[in-house]
Every structure is written in C-alpha cells, then in structure tokens.
Amino acid sequence: MAVKIGDKVRFLNATGGGVVKRFINKDLVEVEEEDGFDTPVLVRECVVVEPVGGQSRPSSAPQVSAKQEVRRPTVEAPAPKVVETREGDKLNVFLAFLPMEPKSLQNSNFEAYIVNDSNYFLQLSYLNKLANGWNLRYSGLIEPNQKVFLEEFSKEELNDLEKINIQFVSFKQGKTFELKNPVSVEYKLDTVKFYKLHSFRSNDYFDEESLIYPIVKNDNPEKQIQVSAEELEFAIKEKSFNERRQPQPIHKNLSNQILEIDLHINNLLDNTAGLSNADMIQYQMDKFREVMTENQKIKGRKIVFIHGKGEGVLRKAILDELKSKYKSCTYQDASFREYGFGATMVTIK
C-alpha cells in the first residue's frame, strides 16, 4: 500500500511508528511519533497499519489468550541492495544548506542535508557547540549514494550553529571492503553567508541553489591542522632564528597613519536584498569588531569609522561597544571638515 500523509505507520526494521506528517522528498517522509518527536524515515521502511480516514488493517495472526505465548522465528532483515559506482570507493561526503524561501531570505527557514556520494554506509552524528558542551542534533545510518534530510532550522537558531561537528564511521554490508578511518570534522560556519543570496549556488546534488560544505573529499577529511604546543614553540624559534639571517624590509609605523573604514552597508555588501535593518546593523557591527581586533595591538593607532548620520542607530551601537568592550580606547567625533557629522575616530591605547 502506498504511503500517504495522515497514514499511521510502523517502522519495518526498527521499533516505533507514528503518523506521516509530510514528504521531505519522494523517498523520505517525516513521521510524528507518539512521544511528539518528528523522525525522518525512508518510505520503504514504513508499513501502513491504519490508512488515513480508514480502519486498522485486520491482523492475519491467530488470536491468543494472555496465558498463551506465540513464538515467532527471528528473521534478520536483509541488507539493502546497494548500486555502487566506480568512483564511490572514495569517500565524498558533504553538508548542504538550502533556503526554503530563497526569494525572501529575511523570513526564510533553512534545511540541512548530508550528502553521501560514496559506496559506503555512514553511521553519522551531527552536532553543534553550545556554551556548556556539544549538542547532538541528528544521529543515524546514511545509506550509500544518498542525500538525507537532517533538520529544519530558523534564522534565530543560526548563532547556535556557528560551530558544528560531523562524525561518522564508514563500512559496507554483505561484502568485504577497504577500511576507512573514522571521521570527525569541525566547522566554524560563516553565518553571514545565510543572509546573502549569492552564497547559495548551483551544484551537482540539488535542483535548488545550495550552500555546500565538504566534510570528506576523495577520502581526505576537511579539518584543521592541529599542532602541539611543543611543535609550535620549536617552529616559532626556528622561524625567528632564520628570519634574522634574511634581509629585512622597512616597516612604517602604522600608529602614525589614520585608518578609514567606511561602514555604509552598500560599501560592505554588493546586494542587500532580503536583509532587514537589524541584519544590516549586525553585519556592520561585525565589520567594526573585525577591524578593532586586527588593530588592538597597534598602540596609538587611529581609526575613523564612517557610519553616516542617519538616525544614529549604528553610531550608538558603536559607542556602546566601545564603552563596554574597549574601555582602554579613546574616541571622539572625527573631523567635521573631512567627514561631516557621520564619523567617529577611535584611538587604540
């Protein structure tokens, strides 16, 4: 029997079941279980026990009393048939984000998918970093050469997704295979990209434009190089010694130069379509913090932030930030003759 929205189903090879809420794609449905949780399940793993608007299926099993016991043989489910590709013995795994309303990014929710472009099964976990530790957002078995829905999230949840981690082990079922190392890849997402339509691009895996992050490419995990403190100290000392033997370029004293930073949004972004005023202020403040961080060790450095007069919202946000996080720095209105009323000069102390 074909699965329809509203059908009550049980899972074929796992404990549980519930009511079909929606089709994620032609192969995947979302089932609301009795505990209220929504679970993505393959259509072929769903058995309809009560069609929408209909009666429960009659059971063909014999009726037994409470005192009787029916013993059924345990049958192990056969391994799914996997269609392998020639290139699939190299792991290629990607994390993808799709806007649900690309023409209205300001109000759009987003979908996250894992793309398994390989001949291997992946026992996978998808996590995000919170203040007190890591939080599991999805865990499950990803079949070969499949893309699987992980979650839907709103723009308000983006800050919680700034640091994410993908972990998995890979294997094949019913045949020998080349052993792959376990994978754990941590990403620091640039959440600003979710505000820019051109961040989402055409790709080989989705009809829609998507933001794609590689997890593993041709068996090579995308991960940061970790260096021990001892190796880092030795490398710094060796670099310092070798640099003293090399001709040294002349460096000008940057503290005597005034750095001008134009914070007008049209100067920072090519396209502001879909951005609210709050989104644009946030982007401008991120640029302000980036410049302050880059120059905080240059004592005497003068930075002019050109924010414009407007309604004074951006200027107030900058002054509040200076008062709370950069108390050692001094600031004043920049030269009226050069910048009018729309600039603030900060001096690094």
Image: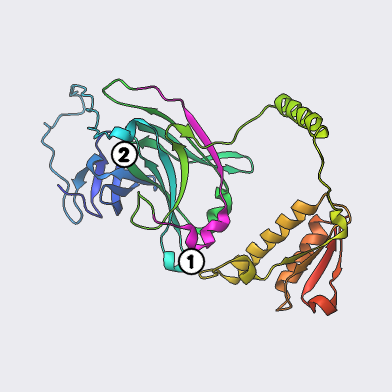
Q: Residue at x 51, y 40 (%)?
A: 127
Is residue 186 highlighted in magenta? Answer: yes
Give the image quarter of residue 176.
top left
Q: Are discs 2 and 1 less than 8 Å apart at CB? A: no
Query: Sequence order check: which comes first, mark 2 or mark 1?
Result: 1
Of circles 2 and 1, the one toward us is 2
Work out whether residue 239 can be spotted: yes
Asked if residue 188 lies left or right of residue 256, the reply is left
Q: Quadrant of the C terminus?
A: bottom right
In this picture, is 98 found above or below 71? Answer: below
In this picture, is 179 found above or below 101? Answer: above
Residues drawn in magenta: 178-202
Pick out the residue farthest to the front: 247
Q: Nearer the viewer, residue 218 or 316?
A: 218
Helix, strand or loop status at disc 1: loop
Q: Where residue 229 sits: x, y (%)? A: 72, 27
Asked if residue 177 lies left or right of residue 214, the reply is left
Amino acid type of the residue tagged 2 in the rendering? Asn
Q: Where residue 95 sits: x, y (%)? A: 44, 45
Q: Nearer the viewer, residue 16 or 216?
A: 216
Give the image quarter of residue 41.
top left
How far, Cα to Cα, is label 2 from label 1? Answer: 32 Å
Q: Residue at x 82, y 61 (%)?
A: 323
Q: Which residue is mark 2?
A: 145
Q: Which residue is mark 1?
A: 107
Q: Residue at x 83, y 67 (%)?
A: 345
Q: Nearer the viewer, residue 314 or 15?
A: 314
